[in-house]
Amino acid sequence: MTNNFSKRVISDKSNGALTVFVQIIYWMLFCTVYSYATFYLKQAGHKSGSIGIIIAIASVLSITIQPALGALADKGGAKQLKQIIISVLLVGASLMLFTAIFSQIFWLMTVLYLMAITLVVTLQPLINAFVMERIVQSKYLNFGITRAFGSLSFAVQSSLLGVLIGLFSDEVVPFAGVVLFALCAVVVFILPIDENSHIIHRRMQSETTKSDAFFKKYPTFILILLGVSSFYAFHTMVNVYLIQIVQNVHGDELQFGKALTIAAMSELPTMLGFGFLLRKFDCSKLFVASGVFFFIKSILVAFATSVTMLYIAQGFQLLSFALYVPASVSYIHERMSEFDKVKGQSYLIASTTFGGIIGSIGGGWMIELFGVHEMLLSGVILAGIGMLLLGFGILRDVRHKSKQIVD
């Protein structure tokens, strides 16, 4: 009996390590396909405006695909979720392989890469759901720690790709995508999952709540969503057009990779230490603080005149994006009832996607029509509006909640 228990513990630890590995590979994949998309497409001959449209189309397609895949997973449970993820990953590997093979056929390469971006973005909530399933099954896992490893792997991959592209060529991007798509599929396939898990069922129940009833129940949440969309538009501008921003301060591809790495590495302390912050501060204050630091970062990026100043601005990821991710999740978890939490998270993801569409299309057009600096100034305005809407929305929500308690 003792021996069986020991084996089970060892198995749990091994599965825990593999679950962390899923996050590691996924965020390396996201860095490769999404964050290096502008660089790769620019090298292929696309202008900033068309790149923005491509990424925006991919975002819109992902919004369309996600509900369909979610409904499919709801019907089949955790086992179906695992099969869907593996299928999407294998299709993604095929798309990146064909992108590399047909890289000289401009229109075909563009379509293939657009579809690959769509799948990477679509995978994010599915991977999160899969990881949450594993967390429920193993006492050795913690979502914050697994996500921190994802940030670390993103940082490593961003630097590694910059070096490899410098040594070889930009074709490193699609080939790296093939390897990472396939490797992630293998790890997900190996990991066991409880077919009787009720997480998917609870998610299905929570999503039956009608939108109008949801916003009547949480009347100030719309302001929060609008605020998130606004500063996420700035966040997307920086992420999508970072190569142009680096070049604008006389940097190169290697420094582009370093700028990505600094931002990703800056996320680690906040994500790892968020539990401590939550014991010291209310999650609503931390959520508002993230909006304030998005605004500060937007000013620093807009007025950076050297690569060093840009590196410093990227370091403010520590208190902007890295604080926003766990603070927003905690805020919804604390504020909303059990059957509304996933609905709230879904609306939050939709708002960031909407902000991403604004940032990718608007940023590309701004660069084409005016220039990089002007695009960044528009980002300052968007981040400022987002900060104010978020702060006002949360303030009203706190007052509304207090009134409900009194009543």
Image: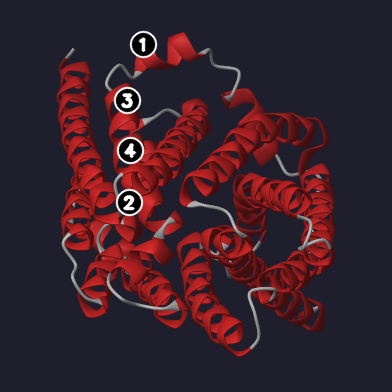
Occupied quadrant, residue 197: top right
Which residue lies at the image location 54% right of the left edge and 40% below the top edge?
A: 53
Q: Using the image as rendered, state which of residue 371 and residue 378 is in the foreground.
A: 371
Q: How many residues crowd around disc 4 within 10 Å: few (fewer than 14), some, or many (20 or more)? A: many
Total count of labels: 4
Quickly name the residue at label 3. Answer: 221
Task: Residue type at mark 1: give it.
Answer: Lys
The Cα atoms of the two marked residues, 1 and 4, are separated by 20 Å
- Asked whether the residues under the numbered discs 3 and 1 touch, taking CB atoms below 8 Å apart as contact, a structural biologist would say no
Q: Using the image as rendered, state which of residue 218 and residue 14 is in the foreground.
A: 218
Task: Residue type at mark 4: give it.
Answer: Val
- The quadrant of the rendering that contains the C terminus is top left
Of labels 2 and 4, the one closer to you: 4
Q: Earlier in the sequence, mark 4 or mark 3?
A: 3
Q: Position of residue 266 (x, y in %)?
A: 33, 72
The Cα atoms of the two marked residues, 1 and 2, are separated by 25 Å
Q: Earlier in the sequence, mark 2 or mark 3?
A: 3
What colour scheme does the image use? secondary structure
The Cα atoms of the two marked residues, 3 and 1, are separated by 10 Å
Quickly name the residue at label 4. Answer: 228
**16 left or right of 101 in image:** left
The Cα atoms of the two marked residues, 4 and 3, are separated by 11 Å
Task: Residue type at mark 3: give it.
Answer: Phe
Which residue lies at the image location 77% right of the left edge and 68% below the top edge?
A: 178
The Cα atoms of the two marked residues, 2 and 3, are separated by 16 Å
Occupied quadrant, residue 167: bottom right
Q: Which mark is residue 216?
A: 1
